[in-house]
Image (cartoon, grey):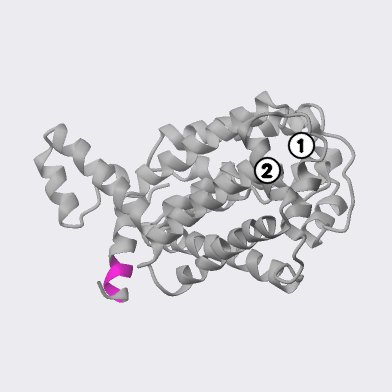
Amino acid sequence: MKSSILFKEYTRLVSNNRWSLQQIVFLGTLISLVINYLSSGMVHQISGNPLVDQEIDPTYWLAMILRLPAIFRGTLAIVLDSILFLSCLASLFIPNQTYSTRIFFIAHFLFFILYNLYSGHHYINIGILIMSFPFVFKTNERFTAGFTFCRFLFCFMLFSAALWKIWRGNLTHFDQGSTLLLLQFKSLLFQESSFQYKTILFFAQNRMMGQLLWLGMIGIELLFFWGFITYKKDNWLLIGHLLFFAGGWFFFDLYFYENLLFLITLYPVLKGINNLKRKVLREKQHPTALSNLASGVPLPDERSSSRH
């Protein structure tokens, strides 16, 4: 299939499945918020003095100049967290409106900035922040453009991370992989007998194997260059990111679960969502709706209402 034809097919799938995509994003968001709450990770549970370090950029300096950490304490911190949950639920269950999605995006932006300030580190779990953005738009045209842009950001995030590692000499520093494993698990490596820790110990003690593991992670990130120029390699990007996530969890104790939301921007996932919806419609015996879907006409509940 030619790239131009595939692009039209991609944007058609995005436009026709807006409500389904919104449900997926905000269901994943709700699960993430519940996890944050249970692990005492909401603003009212962690609020304190911001930690200034070398990672601070102008966005965080502006937040401190505006005294946002001081403002969102106590009652206002609880209000912010409550708004996050309520706007997420409204976005999940109430279609054809953008009020709740806009409120959520603003509230989550504040949450993201405050959380990173309190923790003193820039976490890269940005899947919710980025993937909730397209749903603030009223029209399907702008939503589709925003959603497609999220796919570009997904590819840029991983590919630029690989370039940054290469620039810092990771390809020639042959102790990088094993050193990272030792630093990550130095207090546990000799206390555990599980398969995971035995595997980590093997890679940590074998310099070449540790480096090959690290280079493999960088190689997966480099694959996302293809995402800039074609949709034809999205199957590889899907497999690559799942391997990257699994490797980050298994070897480096990194849980970028929010970033799994980016996977719905890949063509095979979008196609799978659309096919699943068609199957459900077929089982419910809605011939008119199924005919409209096959001809490229969005379903009523997938359209963005221009009245909101």
Q: Is residue 103 left or right of residue 175?
A: left
Return the x and y of residue 232 as percentages of the image width and height: 35, 68
Q: Is residue 186 left or right of residue 307?
A: right
Number of numbered discs visible in the structure rendering:
2
Q: Is residue 108 left or right of residue 55?
A: left
Point out the stretch of residues depicted in magenta. Answer: 4-8
Residue tagged by mark 2? 200
Residue tagged by mark 1? 189
Q: Amino acid at mark 2?
A: Ile
Return the x and y of residue 219 as percentages of the image width and height: 57, 65
Q: Residues within 10 Å of mark 2 (few under 14, many from 20)?
A: many
Camera sees residue 220: yes
Q: For marks 2 and 1, give the CA distance.
A: 8 Å
Q: Nearer the viewer, residue 114 or 261?
A: 261
Is residue 7 on the magenta stretch? yes
Is residue 76 on the magenta stretch? no
The image quadrant of residue 254 is: top right
Camera sees residue 254: no
Say what secondary structure mark 2 lies in: helix
**Label whose residue precedes the other's in the sequence (2 or 1):** 1
Q: Residues within 10 Å of mark 1 (few under 14, many from 20)?
A: some
User: Does the magenta stretch mainly form a helix, a strand or a loop?
Assistant: helix
Residue at the limit of the structure toward the top, as seen here: 38
Look at the picture and state if 151 lies above or below 247.
below
Return the x and y of residue 23 as percentages of the image width and height: 41, 39
Give the residue at x 48% y 56%.
240
Look at the picture and state if 231 lies above or below 265.
below
- Image quarter of the N terminus: bottom left
Q: Nearer the viewer, residue 208 or 246?
A: 208
Return the x and y of residue 279 as percentages of the image width and height: 20, 40
Say what secondary structure mark 1 lies in: loop
